[in-house]
Amino acid sequence: MSTPITAFADLIAPIRPETFFSDSWEIRPLHIRRSDSRYYDALLTNGDVEAAISSGGLRYPAIQLAKGGAFYPPEVFTRNIRSGNDVFGGVPDLDRISAEYKAGATITLPAFHRAWRPLGTLASAVEDYFDHAVHTNVYITPGNTNGFSPHYDTHEVFVLQIAGNKHWKVYEPPLALPHRSEPFRSHGYELPPVLLEVDLAAGDILYLPRGFVHTTLTVDSFSVHVTLGITVYTWMDLVGELIQSRMDDLRLRRALPPGFASREYLKSNLEREFSEIIAELQKAANCQKLVNSFSYRVRLGRPGRSGIGGEFRSNVTATGLRAPPKIL
């Protein structure tokens, strides 16, 4: 019988949280092999995913298709349905989704924690534990298919393998701990030697700190996995709180001198005044007030989770995805 996955400690068991934070968090990838294909059954199963898709209750952008590193336009796999004077947009065309899946497309369910109560409960618990923003996405990939092209994420990633298998290649980050304003750019990027190469089986988890480049491949087996992403607040964000607190400072709102970037004789004055401003900011900073204000805004900005929906109930005939996912 599967164990409920309702807390961060459940995700990384048998690794203890203190060990994870000292050895892996923001440092290096971690692969936990469990040899228990039903470890996540209480959280999400392949059948749950099939039911969610087949029900037709998910509408774009809550269901999407991707192939070759790009997402399909919604009109390729959705339609608008008129009911009297009302129009329901983004309704999935299950036959088209099934056909595209069989042709190698990945089905993605973004922010699935908003629709699936067990994932919502876990996301809420992890967010309460970290005080950083949490989201979950589901990816359903057919066999013998490449995933997205090599890239890194600007959030922490936990990959929960729900069903099937997926092969992962991980590479050193070209930029350590990129800020969310520094997305991966493929232009001019060349893959270094592989740092880590693993096959994720059902029940496994893979942690990737932000910045680590990765790519995936399925072979004979399909794959269903959940990514639990943690978008972190950084010291840079807390420093930004200091700037926000000084928005009423007239000196900071004045324009830089005309020609400041091109006239060399202005630069020494610019540097001197900038140093004075930095010193004044440091002297005037009320660190306790700034931390309290930032913490309050973080808590206030959390989305309410009381509206997380219940479980899908599918009464739709399976549309052709063979075992595993029937719609798939």
Image: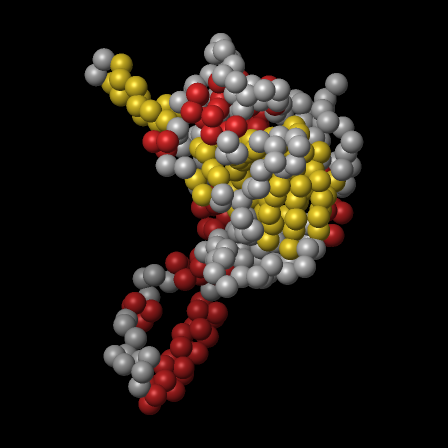
205 over 214 or under it: above or below: above
Q: Report how many numbered discs are placed on residues in the image.
A: 0
Q: Residue furthest left?
A: 85
Say if residue 126 shows up in the picture: no
Say if residue 143 shows up in the picture: yes
User: Residue 144 at what x, y percent from top left?
Assistant: 61, 36
**Left or right of residue 246, residue 25 in this image:** right
Residue at (43% x, 40% y) in the render:
71
Residue at (71% x, 40% y) in the render:
199
Q: Residue furthest bottom?
A: 265
User: Residue 239 at what x, y percent from top left?
Assistant: 48, 61
208 over 249 or under it: above or below: above
**Front residue (pair 154, 300):** 154
Give the quadrant of the N terminus: top right
**Front residue (pair 26, 183):** 183
**Front residue (pair 138, 311):** 138
User: Residue 275 at what x, y percent from top left?
Assistant: 43, 78
Residue at (54% x, 24% y) in the render:
328
Q: Quadrant of residue 121?
A: top right
Residue at (41% x, 37% y) in the render:
72
317 over 252 or under it: above or below: above
**Left or right of residue 224, residue 317 in this image:** left
User: Residue 187 at what x, y percent from top left?
Assistant: 47, 61
What's the image's color scheme?
secondary structure
